Image: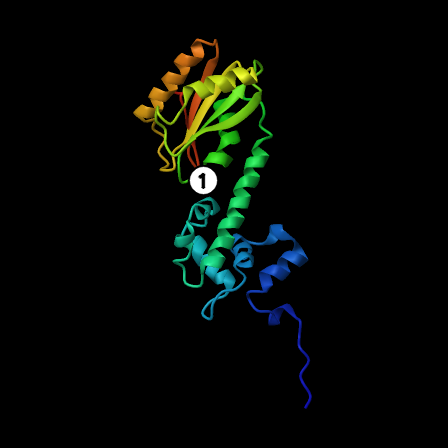
Amino acid sequence: MQHKPTSFSIKNWSDDDKPREKLVQKGRSVLSDAELIAILIGSGSRSESAVELSKRILASVDNNLNDLGRLSIKQLMTFKGIGEAKAVSIAAALEVGRRRRGEDAVKVDKIGSSKDVYNLLQPILGDLEHEEFWILFLNNSNKVLHKAQLSKGGITGTLVDVRLVMKQTLELGAVAIILAHNHPSGTLRPSTADKQITQKIKNACETLDVKVLDHLIITQKSYYSFADEKIL
């Protein structure tokens, strides 16, 4: 019995294989977001291809990859066809992308405006689901000597150790600092606690002749600058 030769035409590939072959033949930049995610999850289900499943997932976050990156493993697993392994693959890939943006942001090494601070720290803070408080330590040319996380989980006077801020400032020989923290909720309005810790650090810095140049509240898409709003 003679078997009909197998055709390797792209028309005969499964829908789940096409994105992979497309990337190999044409390069990664030509693939859509859905096709890239389809490669991550590998396969769809009997009722839909990996690409169709990926399109459905993206549609749930208005095709915003940053919003997709904020979904938990459990949230991703609510989609039919996404088990734990596929959910983990998506989450891991998007976290790699977030960290890559953070490395690119290191190129901003001199601060000339609040926008520079945002560009430097948004890749680190913008997508987080919890609050983190960071400090930039600057020299007299406003060059960033060091950036450091001071606290994680909330902004209160008890979580922010002012003595540690002063110690790091002296060790680095910094003449100015910039405070920053994120609001996962997306609100840009400073809280009473935000204002209190800013004043607390500012008062301590004055004894060392160190300037607090700004305090930024950072969200996924925007920021609030204490200096720009003249409340510093």
Of residues 198 and 188, the one nearer the viewer is 198
**The C terminus lies in which quarter of the figure?**
top left
- Residue 146 percent across, percent down from the top left: 55, 24
Relative to 127, residue 165 above or below = above
Rendered-image quadrant of the N terminus: bottom right
In the rendered image, which quarter is residue 225 located in?
A: top left
- Residue bearing the label numbered 1: 127
Q: Is residue 228 visible?
A: no
- What residue do we see at 57% from left, 40% from top? 100
Q: Amino acid at mark 1?
A: Asp
- Name the residue at 35% across, 37% down: 185
Instruction: Judge left or right: residue 3 versus residue 150.
Output: right
* Colour scheme in use: rainbow
* Disc 1 secondary structure class: loop
- Give percent across and percent down for residue 138: 54, 19
Whether residue 131 is visible, yes or no, is yes
Q: Residue furthest left?
A: 192
Numbered circles on residues, count? 1
At which x and y percent is residue 10? 63, 68
Q: Quadrant of residue 21?
A: bottom right
